[in-house]
Image (cartoon, rainbow, N blue to C red):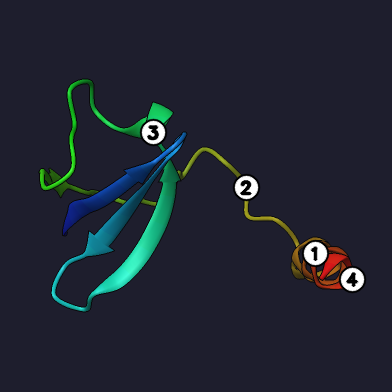
Amino acid sequence: MTGVIRTIEGQYAVIEMGTSKHKVIMPIQFLPQGAKEGHTLQIDITIDPKTPRRPRSKVTNIKEKLNKRK
C-alpha cells in the first residue's frame, strides 16, 4: 500500500492512502527521516503474532470512554 504526505502541520502529517483518498493523521516521529510533503510512502501493516489479541470488552470500554469525552 502507498500513501502520499499531503501536509505536515506541527507535529503531525496528513497522509492520503492509496487510491481511496482516505486520510490518516500520523505523528511525524513515525515518518522516515527526510520525509516531506509530496513524498510517496510505502506502507506495510501486519498483525503482530507475538502480541495476544485484546478481549473485545476492553476495546468496547475504551471506545465508550473516548465517546464520553466528546
Q: Secondary structure at mark 2?
A: loop
On the image, the x and y values in percent for residue 59 come to 75, 64
Q: CA distance from mark 2 to mark 1?
A: 23 Å
Which numbered disc, 4 or 2, marks the residue closer to the eye?
4
Query: In this figure, which residue is indicated by the disc labeled 3?
Result: 28
- Count neighbours of disc 3 (C-alpha within 10 A) and say few if under 14, some if 14 to 19, many if 20 or more: some
Label for residue 66? 1
Q: Is residue 34 above or below residue 10?
A: above
On the image, the x and y values in percent for residue 67 come to 81, 72
Label for residue 33? none
The tag earlier along the polypeptide, 3 or 4, is: 3
The tag earlier along the polypeptide, 2 or 1, is: 2
Amino acid found under the numbered disc labelled 2: Pro
User: Which quadrant of the view contains residue 48?
Assistant: top left
User: Which quadrant of the view contains residue 56?
Assistant: bottom right
User: Which quadrant of the view contains residue 34?
Assistant: top left
> Could you tell me which residue is drawn at 11 percent across and 48 percent down?
38
Query: In this figure, which residue is indicated by the disc labeled 2?
Result: 52
> Could you tell me which residue is drawn at 81 percent across and 71 percent down?
70
On the image, the x and y values in percent for residue 3 come to 19, 56
